[in-house]
Image: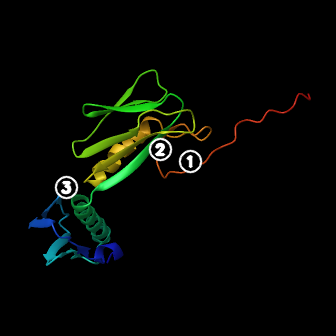
């Protein structure tokens, strides 16, 4: 049995969970999400609690799926009730970010602007559109109800220009620590 899988999921007020065979639909104040549960895992709703049960406790794959399915269900319930938010920062002189239509346009040191499509369930709020020197970064916040979709979008944005270790330029999560390296040290003129 999975330790994560054994935990109960509390269903908050205002959230409705519908079960149709192995298909689960969660509806809340922020929207609705759907997922198909793996056939080895059974889901039950009793009152205001949701259970994920592993019917084949000896099977290794079933043990692994038990915790995964329970975590996905918990994220869905949390997403439709509270939502998820992540802050991003862009460091580098002249770097900036703007939103045009359904795309995030990044100017991060390339000869062209890089466009990243924003998924329909994700919202971007730009607080500081451009960097000011190397000390004040451009900042934006990304919110959404689907944790998987939000995480994939943020990974795609960060992949455009990951932070480099010498000056720290690039796109990073707000709480991310970038380990800095010392540049080359030149010896004095003795030959």
Q: Earlier in the sequence, mark 1 or mark 2?
A: 2
Could you say which is closer to the camera, residue 76 or residue 30?
30
Query: 10 Å neighbourhood of mark 1: few (<14), some, or many (≥20)?
Result: some
Identify the image quadrant of the C terminus: top right
Find residue 30 and name its label. 3
Asked whether the residues under the numbered discs 1 and 2 touch, taking CB atoms below 8 Å apart as contact, a structural biologist would say yes
Q: Residue at 27% across / 62% down in the picture? A: 75
Secondary structure state at the residue bearing disc 2: strand
Label 1, on which residue?
Answer: 178
Tell whether 145 sits left or right of 125: left
Tell whether 137 sits left or right of 165: left
Q: Earlier in the sequence, mark 3 or mark 2?
A: 3
Distance from disc 3 to disc 1, alpha carbons, whole Å, reads 34 Å
Q: Residue at 17% across / 71% down in the picture? A: 43
Percent x, y for residue 77? 22, 64
Label 2, on which residue?
Answer: 172
Tell whether 27 sits left or right of 59: left
Identify the image quadrant of the N terminus: bottom left
Q: Earlier in the sequence, mark 3 or mark 1?
A: 3
Tell whether 134 sits left or right of 141: right
Q: Residue at 33% across / 73% down in the picture? A: 4
Please tell me whether mark 3 or mark 2 is closer to you in this view: 3
Distance from disc 1 to disc 2, alpha carbons, whole Å, reads 9 Å
């Amino acid at each position: 049995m999975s330790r994560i899988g054994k935990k109960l999921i509390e269903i908050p007020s205002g959230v409705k969970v519908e079960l149709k065979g192995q298909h689960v639909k969660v509806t809340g104040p922020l929207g609705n999400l759907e997922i198909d549960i793996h056939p080895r895992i059974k889901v039950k709703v009793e009152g205001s609690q949701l259970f994920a049960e592993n019917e084949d406790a000896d099977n290794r794959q079933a043990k692994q799926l038990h915790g995964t399915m329970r975590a996905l269900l918990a994220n869905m319930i949390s997403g439709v009730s509270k939502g998820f938010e992540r802050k991003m920062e862009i460091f580098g002189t002249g770097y900036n970010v703007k939103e045009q239509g359904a795309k995030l346009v990044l100017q991060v040191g390339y000869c062209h602007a890089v466009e990243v499509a924003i998924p329909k369930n994700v919202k971007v709020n730009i607080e500081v559109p451009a960097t000011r020197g190397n000390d004040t970064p451009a900042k934006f916040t990304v919110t959404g109800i689907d944790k998987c979709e939000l995480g994939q979008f943020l990974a795609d944005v960060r992949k455009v220009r990951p932070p480099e270790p010498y000056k720290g330029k690039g796109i990073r999560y707000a709480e991310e620590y970038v380990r800095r390296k010392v540049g080359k040290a030149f010896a004095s003129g003795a030959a």
